């Protein structure tokens, strides 16, 4: 019912509820197609000019503050949100249906003005925060409404529904009893708390977007325009293409590398899948499996340091730790995930007798490196700067400048392409900005009602202090909250709603936040709302639901690894060296056992009993205890030895073929 009404609303307004097409097929700044003899209207020209000026102004503002220092908190965030809303609503304009264009032009102006007011006049407004002026309240209400609409237009109904529930909860909660009751609050106080302070819309999520994320979306856009993405695919193809199931392994490695700077699993699928999925199908992989491999690997790209879908910066803010600590903690789990996916695709290739690509079809690694080695310099420079203590925004700025200079010198990019790359980077950042502002509504509600603490208490009470039950409930909550949402806002909501319950059960804070983050990410391949799987299925031309379940099977390690590092924080490189090494080794063994159980193959096809036993062996290795490790390894090793002996006997029993005369 909601979808039908939303569709009718979109049709009436002359827009569709899909992601705006920001760059045309030639990679140019978007333009409107004209019929023969048709001329652009003055209105169309004006809108286009304003849109481009706003986008380049936003890019210039953030590059300037990255180089010379950030503005005061409310000013930085206010200007960022003002420009983001202006650009968002101008992108909704359909100049061919001028009857409805004012429905988007007026909100663009209002949203920009309202956000700018809170950003630029925050100091003077603080003096009369208890008796705000009528236009300040009107600006607050307008800002909230426009953020909700922008989230809906850019990302569908899921996020706005969640935001509306959290927005109105303080007004409804005062009429409730029990744990969900809240203090009395008026709508004026609600608006003030959400917009006048850095506790609501202008809180940590928007701060992270305004300070860091927008710079990394610009960085990622330049990576695309300089051909770095193709360079990554070529290197992966040259290194792995000749091995058994080579195309699937290319997909895994290229998605891991591409995902280091990609802010979206869905974008990762499109960026690498258009090459890898047809290649996998060509070499014998079933369409569903090919699409699922790309979806699983692209999802893993979001847990891959250093960017982690931009959530690494936000996690550092929430935990109050250096960014380098988050990156260090994420390395081993990410490596385990991708190794487990490689195990799965290798076993599938062996099961179906799939070979690698002919050597004649592979690019030469030496040639690829010789022609494009310098493309890796900005990425390496970014990592070195961030890990050496340079601020994140300054590191991003230096890396962007280095990339532009290198690309112009090597003629990888023309001077005329710089504005286009900037526009696309800003456009990607704008979508995250509106979501971050929306996530701030959740943060504000939790702060003013204490709901976060109550939800944590409820989860712990229902779990009856049973850690495993609490983890299972948290996993389900994370999968639900993450449905249909990009990486950063999904993590933000989970960090403020669910993670405190785990921390209250004496779980290491880093492990608690990583646990929620992982399952928020896994929701993009978990049916029914499996965005990454749907994108992969679209490229492969197969069933989205079948692709989703296949992706869950391939990425099964992603559902086990979080339990491993909760029970053994050594996987997050927390603790002494020897336990870290031992637990990493047992985790690797467990990942292989899990892949064998999911694919159902080791030397031969495994029957259901052996698969269940192998799954049990993998689960036993979750706990870092020596007894469970020994039992798990013994069960898994016994099954593998049994299959090896069975295979040898089968070969002996095969009668030799008699020679022909």
Image: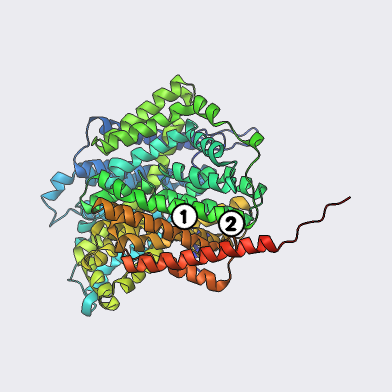
Tell me the residue at 42%/31% (across/down).
Answer: 376
**Image quadrant of residue 361?**
top right
**Image quadrant of residue 479?**
bottom left
Residue indicated by mark 1: 340
Kindly tell me whether residue 145 is visible in this rendering: no
Provide the secondary structure element on which disc 1 rests: helix
> Mark 2 touching mark 1, by CB under 8 A?
no
Measured in 3D between alpha carbons, the distance from the residue under mark 2 to the one under mark 1, in whole angstroms, is 12 Å
Tell me the residue at 32%/72% (across/down).
Answer: 468
Q: Nearer the viewer, residue 10 or 66?
A: 66
The image position of residue 598, as x and y in percent, is 52, 64
- Identify the disc placed on residue 529: none
Residue indicated by mark 2: 348
Label 1 crowd bin: few (<14), some (14–19), many (20+), radius 10 Å: many
The image position of residue 636, as x and y in percent, is 47, 65
The image position of residue 611, as x and y in percent, is 53, 69
């Amino acid at each position: 019912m909601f979808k039908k009404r939303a569709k009718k609303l979109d049709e009436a307004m002359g827009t569709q509820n899909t992601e705006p097409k920001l760059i045309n097929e030639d990679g140019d700044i978007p333009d409107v197609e004209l019929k023969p003899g048709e001329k652009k209207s003055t209105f169309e020209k004006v809108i286009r000019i304003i849109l481009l000026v706003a986008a380049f102004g936003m890019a210039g503002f953030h590059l300037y503050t990255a180089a010379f220092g950030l503005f005061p908190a409310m000013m930085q965030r206010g200007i960022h949100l003002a420009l983001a809303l202006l650009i968002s609503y101008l992108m909704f304009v359909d100049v061919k249906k001028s009857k409805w264009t004012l429905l988007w032009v007026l909100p663009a102006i209002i949203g920009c003005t309202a956000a700018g007011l809170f950003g630029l006049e925050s100091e003077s407004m603080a003096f009369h925060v208890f008796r705000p002026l009528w236009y300040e309240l009107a600006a607050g209400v307008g800002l909230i409404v426009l953020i909700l609409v922008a989230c809906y237009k850019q990302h569908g109904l899921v996020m706005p529904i969640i935001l509306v529930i959290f927005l109105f909860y303080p007004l409804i909660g005062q009429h409730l009893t029990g744990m969900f009751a809240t203090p009395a609050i008026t709508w004026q106080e609600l608006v003030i708390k959400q917009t006048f302070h850095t506790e609501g819309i202008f809180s940590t999520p928007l701060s992270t977007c305004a300070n860091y994320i927008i710079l990394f979306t610009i960085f990622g856009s330049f990576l695309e325009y300089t051909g770095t993405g193709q360079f990554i695919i070529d290197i992966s193809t040259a290194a792995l293409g000749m091995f058994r199931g080579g195309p699937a392994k290319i997909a895994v490695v290229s998605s891991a590398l591409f995902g280091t700077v990609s802010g979206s699993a869905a974008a990762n699928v499109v960026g690498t899948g258009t090459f890898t999925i047809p290649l996998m199908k060509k070499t014998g992989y079933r369409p569903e499996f090919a699409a699922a491999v790309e979806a699983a690997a692209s999802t893993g790209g979001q847990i891959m340091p250093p960017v982690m879908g931009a959530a690494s910066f936000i996690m550092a803010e929430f935990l109050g730790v250096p960014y380098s600590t988050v990156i260090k903690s994420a390395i081993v789990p990410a490596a385990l995930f991708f190794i487990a996916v490689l195990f799965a695709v290798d076993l599938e290739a062996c099961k179906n007798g799939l070979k690698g690509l002919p050597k004649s079809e592979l690019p030469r690694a030496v040639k690829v490196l010789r022609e494009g080695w310098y493309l890796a310099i900005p990425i390496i420079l970014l990592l070195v700067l961030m890990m050496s203590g340079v601020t994140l925004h300054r590191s991003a700025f230096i890396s962007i400048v280095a990339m532009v200079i290198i690309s112009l010198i090597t003629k990888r990019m023309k001077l005329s392409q710089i504005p286009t790359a900037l526009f696309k980077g800003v456009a990607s950042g704008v979508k995250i900005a509106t979501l971050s502002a929306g996530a701030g509504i959740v943060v504000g509600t939790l702060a003013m009602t204490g709901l976060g603490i109550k939800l944590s208490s409820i989860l712990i009470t229902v779990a009856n202090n049973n850690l495993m039950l609490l983890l299972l409930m948290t996993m389900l909550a994370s999968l639900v909250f993450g449905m249909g949402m990009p990486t950063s806002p999904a993590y933000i909501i989970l960090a403020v709603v669910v993670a405190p319950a785990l921390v209250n059960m004496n779980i290491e804070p880093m492990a608690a936040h990583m646990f929620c983050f992982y399952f928020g990410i896994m929701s993009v391949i978990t049916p029914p709302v499996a965005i990454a799987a749907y994108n992969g299925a679209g490229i492969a031309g197969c069933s989205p639901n079948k692709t989703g379940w296949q992706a869950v099977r391939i990425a099964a390690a992603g559902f086990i690894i979080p339990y491993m590092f909760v029970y053994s924080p050594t996987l997050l490189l927390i603790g002494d060296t020897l336990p870290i090494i031992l637990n990493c080794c047992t985790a690797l063994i467990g990942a292989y056992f899990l892949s064998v159980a999911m694919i159902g193959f080791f030397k031969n096809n495994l029957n259901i009993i052996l698969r269940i036993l192998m799954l049990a062996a993998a689960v036993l290795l979750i706990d870092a205890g020596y007894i469970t490790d020994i039992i798990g390894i013994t069960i898994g090793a016994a099954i593998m030895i049994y299959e090896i002996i069975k295979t040898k006997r089968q070969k002996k029993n095969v009668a030799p073929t008699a020679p022909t005369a």
